[in-house]
Image (spheres, grey):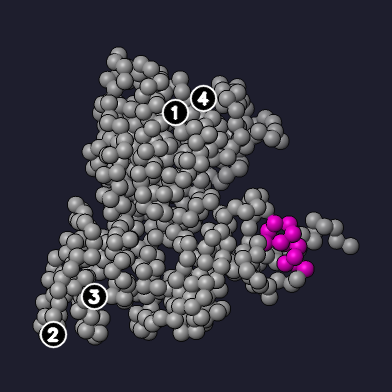
């Protein structure tokens, strides 16, 4: 007779086979009742609605949202196909968000289908589906992405409401920038005689500097004897020219977000004191705060470390080959990696204090910080050597966050664009806040993004003459909420205010870093 753990292993093997086939939404019929009940009881399967489940990690705290947010899009794709076949699509507005790489989990996902019942389907963690009877895109105007049926970019721009340009200005501009030529959209406008939409799109294209497309829309509609009145649907213009040849909507979104977020930061953040002239004194102050910084930064990420463990690892007396079964072994490896990365960051700070461009320094050096951070875990055999190769090659999700980082393929485009913005940015405060925010928004690595993001923040602080600033563990919730506001609502003010206050406090208590007092 099989013992309990052997029975569970059998059920897990069945679940693993489903996962290897790409199954995200597990239906009752995919598993026998015995396997299903066993997996639910042991925390490997979680109910979404009657007859539908998602797989979860048993260590996930009951009621936590991480597994659901990570499964949301895949679940919806399978569930909607099961319900409507191919006779459905997401709304034009949601289609545009997904086309430009905004994978944020919505509170309510609007779905169109002739079979819709104008009904809300409740989903976990205050999310839902709302199906409505509304027109679907024509056959040639349907785009499919990861099983989700969308309006094509052109069809969505023609079909979306004017409110989208006000409520999602960054995403709307990124979508407009995907259009290469007026002829792509004119066919749809002329076919339906859509003069109001034509006027709106002409104004929208002119808003982003695509005057030729705007002119072509107006002239062609007039030539077809339509009365067209151009109207800019955006509330304001942006002082940014999007490259006409840029292929990645992710990159354009980052550029637009950067431009949009600059002003709130300048209003919220304390003025830069100016770069320190006493490099030795500044680095001495950085060294003095190391234990405090390591404790709080590692604790924020969920590692159980103490000041004593951090000092022990830093001292060099700790031997990674000893105490393999020690409960603190993994935490000690992490603390050692943090110490090694800290030393690499210290070298970067020396460079920026010597006058080198902080964006260029962080671009050149952040890979070293990452390799040092995870080097001890590779040496101990907990990670593969290949894990140090560079940016991630898989999708990653952020615990409890509705923000879904860009696809790993997009990371290769996003990171060079990000560091270009860092190099070109003249304001130290903007580099501080957006350096940290954009790094964790892109999430280029499978692990360590928060720690490296805070290192990047402190290198930018040094470049502006601000003191090294610790984000304290007791303010973790405020910190995460501020990051979430920036990522999901594109409201950077809470993060700028949060970091700005900590920096102001550091200016008061950091002491004499140089021959002058801050």
Q: CA distance from mark 1 to mark 3?
A: 57 Å
Mark nearest the camera among 1 and 3 is: 3
Tell me where residue 167 sits by quadrant.
bottom left
Residue 51's label in the rendered image is none
Q: Position of residue 437 (x, y in %)?
A: 38, 44
Q: Disc 3 designates what residue?
A: 197
Mark nearest the camera among 3 and 4 is: 3
Q: CA distance from mark 1 to mark 4?
A: 13 Å
Q: Secondary structure at mark 2?
A: loop
Q: Are marks 3 and 4 in contact (CB under 8 Å)?
A: no
Say few, some or many: other residues with alpha carbon within 10 Å of mark 1 (under 14 / 14 to 19 / 20 or more): some
The relative height of residue 31 versus residue 472 in the rendered view (above or below) is: below
Give the mark nearest the N terminus, 4 or 2. 2
Give the mark nearest the N terminus, 1 or 3. 3
Side of 422 relative to 103 (left or right): left
| In the foreground, 115 or 426 | 115
Residue 291's label in the rendered image is 4
Give me the residue at 28% from left, 54% from top.
256
Q: Disc 1 designates what residue?
A: 343
Q: Secondary structure at mark 4?
A: helix
Mark nearest the camera among 4 and 2 is: 2
Give me the residue at 80% from left, 61% from top.
7
Residue 224's label in the rendered image is 2
Q: Secondary structure at mark 1?
A: helix
């Amino acid at each position: 007779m099989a013992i309990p753990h052997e029975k569970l292993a059998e059920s897990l093997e069945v679940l693993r086979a489903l996962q290897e086939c790409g199954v995200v939404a597990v239906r009752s019929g995919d598993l026998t009742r015995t396997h299903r009940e066993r997996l639910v009881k042991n925390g490997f399967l979680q109910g979404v609605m009657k007859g539908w489940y998602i797989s979860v990690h048993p260590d996930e705290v009951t009621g936590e949202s991480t597994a659901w947010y990570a499964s949301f899009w895949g679940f919806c794709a399978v569930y909607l196909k099961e319900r409507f076949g191919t006779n459905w699509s997401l709304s034009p507005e949601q289609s545009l968000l997904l086309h430009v790489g905004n994978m944020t989990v919505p509170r309510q996902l609007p779905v169109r289908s002739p079979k819709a019942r104008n009904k809300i389907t409740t989903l976990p963690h205050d999310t839902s589906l709302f199906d409505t009877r509304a027109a679907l895109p024509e056959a040639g105007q349907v785009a499919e992405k990861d099983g989700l049926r969308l309006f094509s970019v052109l069809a969505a721009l023609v079909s979306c409401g004017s409110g989208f340009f006000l409520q999602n200005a960054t995403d709307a501009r990124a979508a407009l920038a995907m259009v290469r030529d007026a002829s792509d959209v004119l066919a749809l406008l002329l076919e339906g005689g859509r003069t109001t939409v034509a006027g709106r799109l002409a104004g929208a294209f002119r808003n982003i500097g695509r005057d030729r497309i705007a002119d072509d829309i107006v002239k062609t509609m007039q030539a077809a004897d339509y009365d067209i009145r151009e109207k800019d649907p955006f509330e304001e213009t942006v002082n940014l020219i999007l490259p006409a040849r840029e292929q990645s909507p992710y990159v354009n979104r980052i550029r637009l977000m950067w431009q949009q977020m600059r002003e709130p930061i300048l209003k919220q953040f304390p003025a830069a004191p100016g770069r320190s002239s006493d490099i030795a004194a500044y680095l001495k102050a950085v060294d003095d705060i190391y234990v405090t910084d390591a404790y709080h930064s590692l604790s924020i990420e969920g590692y159980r470390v103490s000041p004593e463990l951090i000092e022990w690892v830093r001292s060099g007396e700790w031997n990674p080959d000893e105490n393999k079964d020690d409960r603190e072994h993994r935490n000690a490896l992490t603390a050692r990696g943090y110490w090694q990365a800290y030393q690499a960051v210290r070298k970067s700070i020396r460079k920026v204090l010597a006058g080198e461009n902080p964006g260029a320094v962080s671009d050149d050096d952040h890979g070293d910080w990452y390799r040092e951070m995870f080097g001890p875990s590779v040496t101990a055999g907990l990670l593969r050597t290949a894990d140090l190769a560079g940016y991630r090659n898989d999708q990653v999700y952020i615990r409890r966050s509705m923000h879904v980082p860009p696809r790993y393929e997009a990371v290769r485009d996003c990171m060079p664009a990000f560091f270009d913005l860092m190099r070109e940015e003249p304001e130290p405060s903007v580099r501080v806040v957006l350096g940290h925010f954009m790094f964790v928004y892109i999430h280029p690595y499978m692990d360590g993004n928060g720690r490296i993001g805070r290192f990047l923040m402190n290198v930018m602080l040094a470049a502006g003459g601000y003191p090294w600033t610790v984000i304290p563990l007791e303010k973790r919730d405020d910190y995460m909420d501020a990051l979430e506001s920036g990522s999901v609502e594109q409201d950077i003010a809470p993060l700028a205010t949060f970091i700005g206050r900590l920096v102001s406090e550091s200016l008061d208590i950091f002491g004499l870093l140089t021959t002058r007092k801050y």
